[in-house]
Image: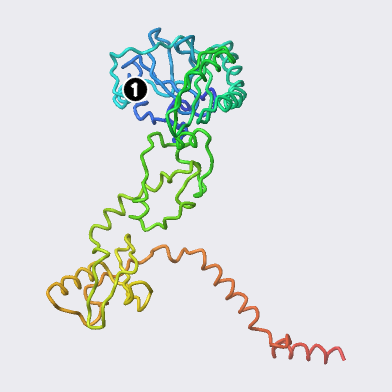
Amino acid sequence: MEDYRYKEQDAFTGKCCKVCDRMDAPLHTFDWLADVPGNYEDTDIVEVQFKNTRKGYYRNSNNIPLKKGDVVAVEATPGHDIGRVTLTGRLVLLQLKKTRLTPESEFKRVYRKAKPVDMEKYEEAKAREHDTMIRSRQIAKDLELDMKIGDVEYQGDGQKAIFYYIADNRVDFRQLIKVLADVFKIKIEMKQIGARQEAGRIGGIGPCGRELCCATFTTNFVSVSTAAARFQDISLNPQKLAGQCAKLKCCLNYEVDAYVEASRGLPSRDIELETKDGTYYLFKTDILKNELTYSTDKRLAANLVTISARRANAVIEMNRRGERPDTLSSTVGEDRRSVDLLEQDNIARFDNAGKNKKRKKNSGKRPDNRPSGKKEKSNTKNNASVE
């Protein structure tokens, strides 16, 4: 029997409402309890998402049959707001723990499912957002405020607007609120965001060719330092390390823990290796391969020798005992490199195949482009028969 949930479509995107929605959408939560019987009767609290990354929890006190994807009108101060239900049932109780709320807390109510009149007001208010943002930027410039208004979000009924701004220092925007309220005749709310949050709201494509992480799945922005690049032996080039927000890329933190764990067994960079051939200094390190390359010169790449971390630690231990090995590299006790099982599927193999075909085609021709001996005999026979 087919599950009815997969036939219900989202009112905005046309996608499945329950569990087949886009998994990299901002603030999206996969409802892994959707198939549990009696899931929706456990709580009357629902999660509602608004424009971009704003969401909240509301109480369905009127017992309206709601499912994921329904567009609803919820309580606001003042008036009402329009949002989309993104989560219902038992999983909402688990999500409340992240926000340090309890089911007994006070929640605003869900009024009703959005009517055509509500959607018309919502579309009218949404159409005013861009013009309001451009005009508010000019007003902030006239007041000589050191801030940038990055986005404006109108409430569903158009009675209130949230102005998202970016500022390096503290800004006194009390006069700005008065001017904006007189100009737009609405209630004003100012909300400060960071450069990473602004990039997530705008969106874009990163140098990796994928959509920005801050515009897809990243909601909690952790501070990124240049130490993460040093652990991964990445060149400290500001142009390559900075993202579209002009801050260090968030992806620098993705693999730094693996590099830190892999580098624990490596010797220190300051330790010199003494052999009968001479003194070797660390030139570079391949952390994931667990290999180190040493040079006989501190500053230049001279007589480079690549050994494993096990061999380097063994030589260090010998130096501590006052012993010196004959050579730095040794095949005894060395780990063999892993074999690449996908090497036979390398795309470059087609290039070699093309060269071999050309050689086969040219093998039957002489340098003067005359046919081979067999073809000459056949041609002479034909010529004789014609004569």
Q: Position of residue 216 (x, y in %)?
A: 46, 37
Q: Nearer the viewer, residue 172 or 261?
A: 172
**Is residue 356 depicted above or below 346 in this figure?**
below
Q: Look at 31% across and 27% down and name the residue there.
A: 98
**Viewed as shown, does residue 332 lie left or right of 143?**
left
Q: Tell me if mark 1 has few (under 14), some (14-19) or many (20+) residues whose alpha carbon lies within 10 angstroms of its own.
A: many
Image-quadrant location for residue 292: bottom left
Task: List the residue tagged with mark 1.
Answer: 92
**Is residue 80 depicted above or below 288 in this figure?**
above
Image-quadrant location for residue 92: top left
Q: Position of residue 315 (x, y in %)?
A: 20, 73
Q: Look at 37% across and 50% down and name the residue there.
A: 226
Label 1 sits on what residue type? Val
**Viewed as shown, does residue 346 lie left or right of 264?**
right
**Is residue 254 depicted above or below 325 in this figure?**
above
The residue lying furthest to the top in this view is 62
Q: Position of residue 378 (x, y in %)?
A: 75, 88
Q: Is residue 2 visible?
A: no
Q: Nearer the viewer, residue 246 or 289?
A: 246
Q: Is residue 369 visible?
A: yes
Q: Nearer the viewer, residue 200 or 133?
A: 133
